[in-house]
Structure formats: structure tokens, C-alpha cells
Amino acid sequence: MSNLLARYADAIFWLARYVERAEDVARILDVNETFSRDSRGDQNWRSVLQIYADLPRFHETHEEATADAVIHFYTLDASNPTSIVADIAQARSNARMLRPLISTEMWTQLNIFHNRLRQMSPRDVSEPRLSRFCEFVKQGCQAHTGITEGTFYRDEGWHFYRLGRAIERADQTTRLLDVKYHLLLPSVEHVGSPLDVSQWNALLRSAAAYHAFRRLHPSDMTPANVVGFLILHRAFPRSIAANVDAIETNIAQMRDRYELAGGSAALERIRGVRRSLDSETSSNIIRQGLHEYLDALQQELIAVSHELGTAFFGHAPLRTAA
Amino acid sequence: MANETAVPGRIPGLEDGLLSTYDSGDAYDEFLGLRSRVSANTAAILERINGMDLETLRERARDAELDLYNFGITFTVQTEKDHIDRILPFDVIPRIITAHDWNRIERGVRQREAAVNAFLWDIYHEQHILNDGTLPRDLILGNENYRPEMEGLDVAHGTYVHINGTDLVRGGDGHFRVLEDNCRNPSGVSYVVENRHLMLRGFPDLINALPVRPVSNYGQRLREALGEIAPAGVDDPVVVVLSPGTYNSAYFEHIFLAREMGVPLVEGRDLLVEDEHVYMKTIRGLQRVDVIYRRINDDFLDPEAFNPHSMLGVRGLMRCYRNGTVALANAVGTGVADDKAVYAYMPRIIRYYTGEEPIIPNVETNICREREGLHYTLDHLSELVVKPVNEAGGKGITIGPHASAEELEACRQRLLEAPHAYISQPMVNISVCPTLTEEGIQPRRVDLRPFAVTGRDTWVLPGGLSRVALRRGSMIVNSSQGGGSKDTWILE
């Protein structure tokens, strides 16, 4: 029996990340499109470039961050590696490489999804249609997730897949929250205004969190509540705490079940993040500065990825197996 | 008595349907055979096709084509700014081979496989066939595919060619002949299996209840054969398929092979040599690899032993192979057996090692490196097919009867400049098979590539790749020249 190839583990980890990323970019574009209907219009699109730290790269090829330009940049621009079409192309390319490992259905769905995306025109992502486009992308990504859940063989590969998805999802939730930061903090006087409330609403909806949030907080739409829900609330599957838990559980389970020697550094690192979340409160996060807090979380997630690469993906020299 | 009044080339008894105007002319027809005796099964298939209407057939053909794209049964073509997925065109009308014909093909393929392995063992050991003058010494030792690195190396079971694909054509007399041997990395078996899947999905009514032999266990048989050649003392060998990578045009097939065998598809960068063993990089560290089905040519296999600039291979692999710590399929140095110049000597090689006459003869071949062959070729240029010995994919071929005066003259010049680089053969009136075309169902030329798998023994896949020349009148079935493929039904 052969062990899982290091390159395959890397590819499956990133397959999950690319699909999750495409879904989350669609969510961020969708919520931003809603925000952009306010008086500041185009300025809002600039914030998407900020949260993905893409401003310098964007300006290499574009003068102004107009709605059309930013939308194209993140949807159909295949030359931009962070666009949805590039994410899905990468996912498809990884899936093709992984065909000896994954189910035929996983491959076929991604291949068809990618082909449909490639055939789309600028008209399909124009502002009036953007929301439909985002819906299409989300459904394609969710179909992938469902097929994977239902057909992918459970071994180390499955754990790497889930690790990729959880790390990416946690990272993307930090960025989604950051959209709000970039839009609102420069104008604190808006806090609690009707516009403010409707924006928090939209933010929750884009994370598919609105109804779950309402069950927990039937009447209070305070920033602290929303931040607490999306960062600390473990029962919500897109919250940072839920995904940090998933990362920790997956690494621990995998090491235990498959008797893997590597991965202790990644496990220690994510345990540290989990412990700090355990004792955190939303008001404390806001007091420290939401943006700074999210930034630090992103750095930790990058560090965990790096440790996984060293331990399992052949990013560092390997030794002969026992 | 329909046969007595039938028009030659037309199909008796199918006057009212889709095939009523089908006419295969003077070529041998794969469905009709010698027309007087169409088997009951073939007649049933013909009747089913005849009963379909053209629009339904075209619609199902489009569905099958869409399936090919969706399932990713494609090869990638690089352009300047993009990559394009192409499919090998699939013709929905199957090619039928009767049990009687198949029996002969199977025996012929086995015989050839046995002869080729005995030949390779001999030339890499005692060289009897050269020493007694049966083959010219320089033809073999001066051949660029001869690998001195293989001299004295004892391969398991004497098998060099673990996967063999022999290209056959059928002439106007209804007899199969070998057109070409493929002893290095014969490709196409994935299409044999995938074409069957397409037919089962798209045409359940056509194949229903017919005794068609299954092809789906190819991967299992291949995995067994590869297990049989593992280094001594290895009970549960780690087998891998080694691919040049995703940009190779046969990458789909590499995926297919790995999937069907349930083994990893690795690239050179996944492997390394330490302490005279080959290892692959896994999540648990380095793991020993015992058998490599490599889809990389000899040249690129090991920069230490062959092309020093190869980025695809594994440094030190050849050392491990020579030390017997890893097995390769196919063996290194098999290219000397499927060389077009050596092909001409295959009948002699078969007689030499098996003591038998070839069960499937060669197409008669003139060797232009020999004075007699060159003169005959130059004197009969307009009747002959002239082929370069070092090209594949139908490249560089001059078909005398179809060539213009200028083309013939250019060919003559090339022959005079480098006679050793060419062979010539008479034009074979290659057999035809009913094929769905723009103009309805028309006869188109087909060849056949059966696949033999050999570990300890030889197994022949009961099927094969039928390539079809989709252009009217074309004799060249290669995919690079507008060829497609058909499902091939071997009847019980």
C-alpha cells in the first residue's frame, strides 16, 4: 500500500482552499454590491481591493477602482490569480492532477463548473446581474462541497481537504468582517444609524448568518453582537472559532488515527489560537481594534499553513519512512 | 435469394433504412466481411443501426461528445495565451470483430510479443542473431534506440515489453497485416475502455444482449503483471505510474492508468534516489518504490544516464534499475524492436526465435537502406507509400498514388539523399467501417491496435483501439491527421 504522496496532500489541501475562496469572494462581492448602493458608490469597491491587499497589483493594470473594473478583476479576469475564474481554474487543475485520488463525480462537477465560468461574458457580471452570478458561483462551490462530503474516501486526504477548507474559511471570515471595518470606521458617527444597521444586516446575510444570528439575538443588531457571532460563536459553521476548532480537531485526529509523526508544530500553533479565542469577548476585540485583531488572526492562520507544508507537503526535505 | 441480385458493396436485406444507400465499394468492409456470410450477431447490429434515424444518431453523437468534454477525456493544446481542451473525435458506430478473426489476431499478437522479448533478450545478451548474420549488426548496434546500458541485464521473466500495442490493418483480401509495432509507450488503451463506457451510456439499445467481450478489467490485469516483475523479495510492491506531467498530450491516459490500477500517478519531482533505491515523497517521509510504469521515453528517464538536460526524469534511476532494486515497464531499450527499419525484419525475427511462420504477416516492405529495396522504391514511387523510419503520427509519409508530380520528385530527392531513413510499402486498400459523417453513414478506413500485457505470461485485451480516418478517402487514421476512434466489439 502506498502512502499519500506529499504533492497530492498539498494539492488536495489547496483544492479545498481554492473552492472555498471562490465561494467567499462571491460572498464578499455580493455584500459589497449591496453596500455600494449608498452615496459613496465606487469608494466601496476600493475596499474590496484593500481587504485582499490587492491594491498595488490592481493599479498595475487599472487607473481607477471603478465598480466595473473591480468586479471584472475579481470575477472573470483569468490573469488575476485571485479572481473567481482563476480560483476555479486552479481547483480544476488540482482536481485533474488528483484524479487517481478523488471521485469521478468530484472531478466532473469541477470540470463542468470551470467550463461554464470560462464561457461567461462581462455582461454576465455587470452590476445588475452580479448577485445572480454570485449565486451561481456559490451554488457551484457548494455542489462541490456536497459531492466531496458524499463521495470522497475517508483517509488522510480527507483530513487535508478539511484542513484546507477550514483554514481558508476562517481566513475569509476575517476578511468579510474587515469589509465593514474599511467602510465604517472612517465615519464613526454613523454607528447605530439606519445605514449602519442595514450594512451589518447585509454582512450577516453574505455569510449566510442572518437567520442564525436572529435566533440568538432577536432584537439587538449591535456591532459587538455581530462581531461576537462571526468570530467567537462556535455553533455557526462560518465563524472563526468553529473553523479554528475544526483545524485543531483535524490535525489531532489525523496524527492519532494514521500515526503521523509530523504536524506537532501546526497543532501547537492552532491550539494557541483556540485558547485565546476561548477567553475572548467581543467587546474586548472592538476595544483593541477589530482590524488589528483580524490581522493577527490571519497571520496565525498563515503560520499554521506553513507548518503543515513543512510537515507534510514536502516543502522541507523528507526523511526515509520508518 | 437476395445475395444473387445484390449490388456489390451494398448490404443485402437493408433496403429500407439508414444503411440502404451505404456502399463500401471495393474495400473490405468490417461489417459485411465477404458479404456472403454475415454472422447472425453482425446482422443483428446492422439491423439495429439500420432502424435508427439520422437525427437521433446525430443527437446521441453530440451527447457523447459532450460527455467527453465533461468527463475530461481530453488533451490539452497550448496556444500563445491560453490552453484549449480537445477531444479525440468519437464515432458512435462500433467496429465489430468476429470470434474467428479475433482468435487469429490474439494468437498473432502473442507470437509477436514472444518473439520481440526473445529478440531483445538476445541482442542485450549473447547476440546470436547478429553473430550468425541473420540481421545486419549495424542495423541494431548502430540504432539510436539500442541502449548499451541494457547489456547483460536480466529482466524478470525475460519480459522487456510489458505493454505492447501492435497496429494492424486489413487489406482488400480480408487478411490482417501488421503495419507497425509499438514497444515503447503505446498509448490509446484509455480510449478502448472509455469508448465502451460511452457506448454503454449512450447506446444501450445497440449493445443490448449482444455477446460483446468486456474490456473493463484492463487495469486489474496490468496491475497484476506489474506485480509479477517486482524486485525479488518484495511481496506487496509499491507500483506507480510515472508521467511527464499535466501538459503531456497523453496525460488523460496516465490518469486513467493510475486510477484503474489504484496507484499514485507520480512525476519526476516526486521521486528521488538514495542508497541505490528509488523513493517517493509522501506525507510520512520517503517511501520505497518497487515498480514504475513509466510513460517517459528512455532519453528523459534519468539525466545521469541519458539526456543530461531532462527535467522529467529521476537522477540515478538507471543505476537502481541495473542493480535490480526497482523494475521498469516497459524496459529500457525496447525502441530498437519497434523501429520502422527493424520492422522490415520482423518476419525473420519471428521465425528465428519461435520456429513458426508469422501468424499475422507484415505489410510487404522494401528497405531503402538496401540497394535492391531503394531501386525498387525509386522505380515504383507512384505506386508505393514511402515512410520515414524515425517519425511517428503519420508525419513525413508520401502516398504515391495520391501524390502530385512535385511531391513525388521531392520524395525521390529525399530518398537519394538519405535512403537509410526510409522504407516503402505497397498501398494497402485498408478496410472500411460504416461511420457517421456529414453526408450520412459512409465507409471510412479503420486500423486496429490490440494491446498485450505481459508479466510472467501474456494477456491480450479482448478489444483494441480502432482508429478511423474521418476524412473521405483518407488512409491516415492518426489523431494528428484528423482521425477519430470507435468502440471495438469483440464478439464471443
Image (spheres, helix red, strand yellow):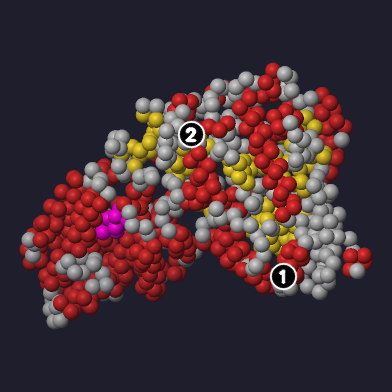
Q: Earlier in the sequence, mark 1 or mark 2?
A: 1
**In which quadrant of the rendered image does the C terminus of chain A lie?**
top left
Residue farthest toward the top in the current orientation of the protein: B131
Locate residue A55: give its quadrant.
bottom left
Q: CA distance from mark 1 to mark 2?
A: 48 Å
Does B177 sit above or below residue A24?
Answer: above
In this figure, which residue is indicated by the disc labeled 2? B327
In this figure, which residue is indicated by the disc labeled 1? B48
Magenta-drawn stretch contains B472: no
**In which quadrant of the rendered image does the N terminus of chain A lie?**
top left
Q: Secondary structure at mark 1?
A: helix
Locate residue A90: give its quadrant.
bottom left
Q: Secondary structure at mark 2?
A: strand
Q: Which residues are magenta?
A: A158-167
Describe residue B195's horizontal placement relative to residue B55 as left or right: left
Looking at the rendered structure, which numbered label has been put on residue B69?
Answer: none
Residue at x-position 23% and y-position 73%? A209
Describe residue B486's horizontal placement relative to residue A92 as left or right: right
Describe residue B272's horizontal placement relative to residue B294 as left or right: left
